[in-house]
Image (cartoon, rainbow, N blue to C red):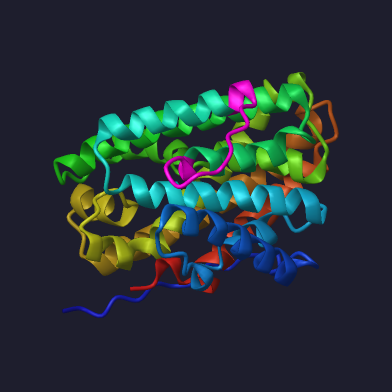
C-alpha cells in the first residue's frame, strides 16, 4: 500500500496557547470525568487534549470564558462521537432536546439516566449567565444549522457514497461547526459585533474563506483515521472520485485548495474589510487568523486524529 504523505501548511501566525492552558486542561478533564462516571462510560479522554482546541483558538479570552467555551466544545466532540453509533431518529431527538435546553435555560440536575442532558444544561448555564442575550440567540441558531447540515452528511454515510464535489462544498463548510466557533470568538473576547456588520456581504465573504480553510485542514489531517473508519465525508476522497486521482494526488490537491483559499482570505482582509465594513473589526479578523492557526495545531497536539 502506498505510504501517504500529509504536507504541513505554511501559516504566518505563530502558535500561541492560553496562559492558563494547563489549568484549563485539568479543570476540563475533572469536569468531563464527573459526567463520564455518571454515565458509566470510559472517561479516559486526556490524550485527546480537548481543551487545547479552545486554549489555542480562543487564547485571548479570560480564564472563565475560555473554560466555558472549552466545556461546550468538549461536550460537542463527545456528542458527535456518540452520534456515530445512533440511528438518525434518536440523534434528531437528542439534538432537538439540546436546542430546547439552551432556548429555555433549563437547569437539569445530574443523575445516571440523564447525564447527557444534564451535561449540556451545565455547560450552557456557564455560557448563558455571562453571554449577551442577542448573541445567545445567534449561537442557538448556529447550533441548529450545524445539526441540520450534519444530518445531510449522514445521508452519504448511510449509503457509503462519496458525495459529488458541488454537494460536498455546499454542505461541509457548515457541517464542520465553524459558525458556532465563530460565535465563540465574540463570547470569549466579550466583544460583540453589530447587526450591521453581521449582515455585511464582505464580512460573510471573510467568514466563507475561513470556513473553507478550516474544514479542508480538518479533512487533510483526519483523512487517515476516516479511511480506517470507512467514512466518506472527506474532501480528499471527493477529489479522488471527482478527478480520478490517486490518494496522494488528492492530498496534494487538498493542500493546494487550502493555500488558494488562504490567499483569497488574505486578499479580502487587506483589500475589502477596512473600506467596506464601517465597524472596526480588526479584533475579529485577528481572531479568525488565530482560529485558523489553532485549528491547524490541534490536529498535531491531540490524539483524537491518531490511528
Horizontal and vertical percent position of residue 245: 21, 60
Is 109 inside the magenta-drawn segment? yes
Q: Say which quadrant the C terminus sits in.
A: bottom left
Instruction: Evaluate whether residue 266 shows in this view.
Output: yes
Residue drawn 75% across the image and 58% down it? 59
Report the side of 213 relative to 65 (left or right). Answer: left
| Quarter residue 32 falls in | bottom right
Instruction: Evaluate whether residue 257 shows in this view.
Output: no
Report the side of 133 relative to 307 (left or right). Answer: right
Horizontal and vertical percent position of residue 215: 46, 49
- Where does the magenta region start and end? 102-116
| Quarter residue 87 falls in | top left
Residue drawn 70% across the image and 48% down it? 68
**Type of secondary structure dominating the magenta stretch:** loop
279 lies above or below 5: above
113 lies above or below 252: above
In this rendered view, identify the residue nearer to me: 133 or 185. Answer: 133
Amino acid at each position: 500500500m502506498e505510504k501517504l504523505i500529509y504536507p504541513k501548511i505554511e501559516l504566518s501566525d505563530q502558535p500561541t496557547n492560553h496562559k492558563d492552558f494547563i489549568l484549563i486542561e485539568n479543570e476540563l478533564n475533572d469536569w468531563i470525568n464527573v459526567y463520564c462516571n455518571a454515565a458509566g462510560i470510559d472517561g479516559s479522554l486526556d490524550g485527546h487534549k480537548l481543551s487545547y482546541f479552545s486554549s489555542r483558538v480562543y487564547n485571548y479570552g479570560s480564564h472563565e470564558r475560555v473554560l466555558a467555551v472549552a466545556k461546550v466544545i468538549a461536550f460537542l466532540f463527545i456528542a458527535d462521537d456518540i452520534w456515530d453509533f445512533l440511528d438518525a431518529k434518536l440523534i434528531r431527538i437528542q439534538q432537538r432536546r439540546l436546542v430546547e435546553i439552551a432556548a429555555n435555560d433549563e437547569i437539569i440536575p445530574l443523575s445516571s439516566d440523564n447525564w447527557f442532558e444534564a451535561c449540556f444544561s451545565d455547560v450552557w448555564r456557564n455560557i448563558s449567565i455571562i453571554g449577551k442575550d442577542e448573541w445567545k440567540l445567534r449561537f442557538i441558531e448556529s447550533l441548529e444549522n450545524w445539526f441540520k447540515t450534519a444530518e445531510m452528511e449522514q445521508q452519504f454515510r448511510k449509503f457509503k457514497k462519496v458525495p459529488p464535489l458541488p454537494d460536498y462544498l455546499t454542505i461541509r463548510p457548515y457541517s464542520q461547526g465553524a459558525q458556532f466557533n465563530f460565535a465563540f470568538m465574540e463570547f470569549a473576547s466579550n466583544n460583540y459585533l453589530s447587526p450591521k456588520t453581521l449582515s455585511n456581504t464582505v464580512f460573510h465573504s471573510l467568514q466563507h474563506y475561513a470556513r473553507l480553510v478550516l474544514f479542508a485542514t480538518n479533512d487533510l489531517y483526519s483523512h487517515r483515521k476516516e479511511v480506517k473508519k470507512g467514512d466518506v465525508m472527506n474532501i480528499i476522497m471527493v477529489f479522488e472520485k471527482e478527478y480520478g486521482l490517486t490518494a496522494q494526488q488528492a492530498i496534494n490537491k487538498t493542500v493546494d485548495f487550502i493555500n488558494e483559499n488562504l490567499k483569497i482570505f488574505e486578499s479580502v482582509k487587506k483589500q475589502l474589510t477596512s473600506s467596506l465594513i464601517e465597524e472596526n473589526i480588526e479584533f475579529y479578523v485577528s481572531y479568525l487568523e488565530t482560529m485558523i492557526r489553532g485549528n491547524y495545531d490541534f490536529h498535531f497536539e491531540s490524539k483524537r486524529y491518531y490511528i
